Image (tube, rainbow, N blue to C red):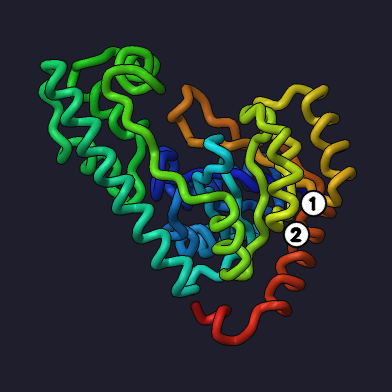
Amino acid sequence: MFADLHLHSNYSDGTYTPEEVAMHGSRYDLGVLALTDHDTVEGCEEMAAACARQGIEFVAGSELTAELNQNELHLLAYFLDTTNAALLEAMGKFQNVRQNRICEMVERLNKLNVPLEAEAVFKIASCRSPGRPHVGRALVQGGFCKTLDEAFERYLKKHRPAWVPKFKISAVEAIELIHCAGGVAVMAHPGLNRSDDLIPELAEAGLDGLECYHTKHPPATVEHYLELAETHGFLVTGGSDCHGMNKGKPLIGKIKLPYEHVRDLKRRSEEIRQGLDPVSTQG
C-alpha cells in the first residue's frame, strides 16, 4: 500500500475539493492520503469522509510557514488533533494575517493601476486561508493577465511590485504547536529550501522528520535527504504537493510513499500524545 502525504485542496490554495482529491487518490491506487492545506485543518472532516467512501486511510494534517534564523521553511504536521484549542486559536491568527495580506497585495495592484478588488479574490478563494494563487487567478479572471504564470512574473513573485512578505511563526514555536496537538512535525521539501545548515538546530527543537520524496526532488536529492534522515534519526515522508490544476497539471500519483513510513509516523504520534499532559491535549 502506498501513500501521498502532501496534498492541498480548495480549503487553501488547491483547486480540487477534498472529494476530488480522494477520487484522484483512488484512481492512482493510493491507500493513504494526507490533507496538508496551508494554515488550516478546515477541510479535514470533509476529506476524512471522502476517503472513507473510497476505502482510503486518511491522515489529518496541515502545512505551516515558519522561520528560523531569517530563513523561511515549511513544516508539515501529521496526525493532528483537529479539535485542539491551541492549534485552532493559532490557525485563526494565521488566517487573519493571510486575509490582511490579500488586501495589501490588492492595494499595491491598485497603485499600479490594476483595478482588482479584494472581494473578487476572496470570492475565488472561498476559504479562510487565501494565498497568492487566488490573487493570480483573480488577475486572470479579471482580464489583467493571460495566465497564472504571467500574474506571478509581473506582480506576485517575491520582490515583484505586488508581493507582500508572509507572516512566519518561529520554527521552534511551530514544532511545539504541532506536538501540542499530538502531531508529528516534518520539514517540507528541504531540497527547495537550501537550508541544510538549519537541520541540526531543527533536530534540537524536536523536528521529527524530513520530506525526502517530493515531485521536485530528483533522485540524487532524495538520496541526500534519506542519508540526512538516517544521520539525525528522522522519519521519512513524501508527497506530490499537488494543488489540483493550480500548477498546470495535477501532481497526485507522482509520489507513492511505501506504507511502512506511515506506520512510523503513527508510532511517533502515539509517543507524542503519551507524553502530553491532559491539559495540553485539550489545548
Answer yes or no: is residue 115 visible: yes
Per the image, the residue denoted by label 2 is 265
2 and 1 marks in contact (CB < 8 Å): yes
Residue 205 image-quadrant placement: bottom right
Q: What secondary structure is found at the residue carrying circle 1?
A: strand
Residue density around tag 2, few if under 14, some if 14–19, many if 20 or more, within 10 Å: many
Residue at 72%, 79% in the rendered image: 274
Amino acid type of the residue tagged 2 in the rendering: Leu
Residue 122 image-quadrant placement: top left
Q: Nearer the viewer, residue 52 or 36?
A: 36
Per the image, the residue denoted by label 1 is 235
Place of residue 14 in the rendered image (x, y in percent of width and height, measured from the top left): 44, 39
Place of residue 160 in the rendered image (x, y in percent of width and height, measured from the top left): 33, 17
Amino acid type of the residue tagged 1 in the rendering: Leu
Between tags 2 and 1, which lies in front?
1
Q: What secondary structure is found at the residue carrying circle 2?
A: helix
Judge left or right: residue 65 versus residue 151: right
In the image, residue 103 above or below residue 34: above
Judge left or right: residue 24 versus residue 149: right
